[in-house]
Image (cartoon, rainbow, N blue to C red):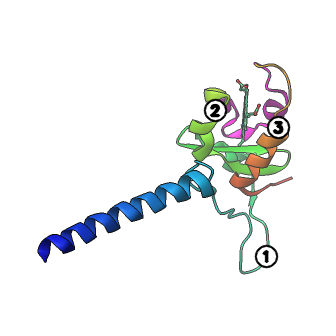
C-alpha cells in the first residue's frame, strides 16, 4: 500500500516536471523571461503633475550607484540598466549631466545615434522632466 503511494507521488512529480518543460520549450519558445521593467514614477498620482528636476539635482546622481541622465529635456534614472548596457561602461560618461549629445552621437563608437531600440529602452527609466 505504502509502495503504491510512493509510486504515485513519483509519477505525479515526473508529470509536473514534464508539463513545466513542455510549457517553457513550446509555449514560451524556450525563453524564460524575467520582467526587469520599472514602473515609471514620473507623475504624481494625486495631482497628475510631472516631476521636475533641475540640472543641480541630476548632478547629485552622477555615479554608478545612482546614475541620472537628462536626455532631450527628460530625466532618466538608468542605474538598473548600467550592467545591461551593450556599450558597457561608456554609459557612465552620461551620469549626472545633460547627456543628450553623448546619447545622440556616441562619440567613441562609431559617432552614430543610438538606434530606436535604445530610445525605447529609455522609456523604462523615465522619472520626470528637466526644468527649463
Ligand atoms: C549617454 C551615454 C551613453 C553612451 C556614451 C553610450 C554608448 C553606446 C555605445 C558605444 C554603444 C554601441 C555598443 C556596441 O555596439 O558595441 C551603445 C549601444 C547601446 N546603448 Fe548606449 N550609450 C549611452 C547611454 C545609453 C542609455 C542611457 C541607454 C538606454 C537606457 C542606452 C542603450 C543602448 C542600447 C539598447 C544599445 C544597443 C544598440 C544596438 O542594438 O545597436 N545607452 N551605447
Q: Which residue is mark 2?
A: 92
Q: Quadrant of ligand 1?
A: top right
Q: Is 18 on the left or on the right of 22, as rendered?
A: left
Image disc number at residue 66: none
Q: Is mark 1 within 8 Å of ligand 1?
A: no
State the SS at label 2: helix
Residue 34 in percent (x, y) is at 56, 54
The structure residue drawn at horizontal position 66% and vertical position 42%, both measured from the top left corner, is 59
Q: Residues within 10 Å of mark 2 (few under 14, many from 20)?
A: some
The structure residue drawn at horizontal position 84% and vertical position 27%, both measured from the top left corner, is 105
Q: Is 98 on the left or on the right of 25, as rendered?
A: right
Image disc number at residue 100: 3
Q: Which residue is mark 1?
A: 48
The structure residue drawn at horizontal position 79% and vertical position 42%, both measured from the top left corner, is 117
State the SS at label 1: loop
Q: Please give the range of residues in magenta.
A: 91-108
Question: Taking 29 as reference, is 96 above or below it?
Answer: above
Q: Is residue 92 magenta?
A: yes
Amino acid at each position: 500500500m505504502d509502495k503504491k503511494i510512493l509510486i504515485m507521488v513519483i509519477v505525479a512529480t515526473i508529470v509536473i516536471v514534464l508539463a513545466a518543460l513542455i510549457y517553457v520549450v513550446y509555449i514560451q519558445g524556450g525563453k524564460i523571461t524575467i520582467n526587469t521593467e520599472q514602473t515609471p514614477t514620473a507623475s504624481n498620482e494625486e495631482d497628475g503633475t510631472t516631476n521636475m528636476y533641475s540640472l543641480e539635482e541630476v548632478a547629485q546622481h552622477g555615479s554608478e550607484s545612482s546614475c541620472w541622465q537628462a536626455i532631450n529635456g527628460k530625466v532618466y534614472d538608468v542605474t538598473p540598466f548600467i550592467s545591461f548596457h551593450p556599450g558597457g561602461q561608456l554609459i557612465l560618461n552620461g551620469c549626472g549631466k545633460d547627456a543628450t549629445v553623448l546619447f545622440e552621437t556616441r562619440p567613441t563608437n562609431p559617432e552614430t545615434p543610438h538606434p530606436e531600440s535604445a530610445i525605447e529602452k529609455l522609456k523604462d527609466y523615465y522619472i520626470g522632466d528637466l526644468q527649463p
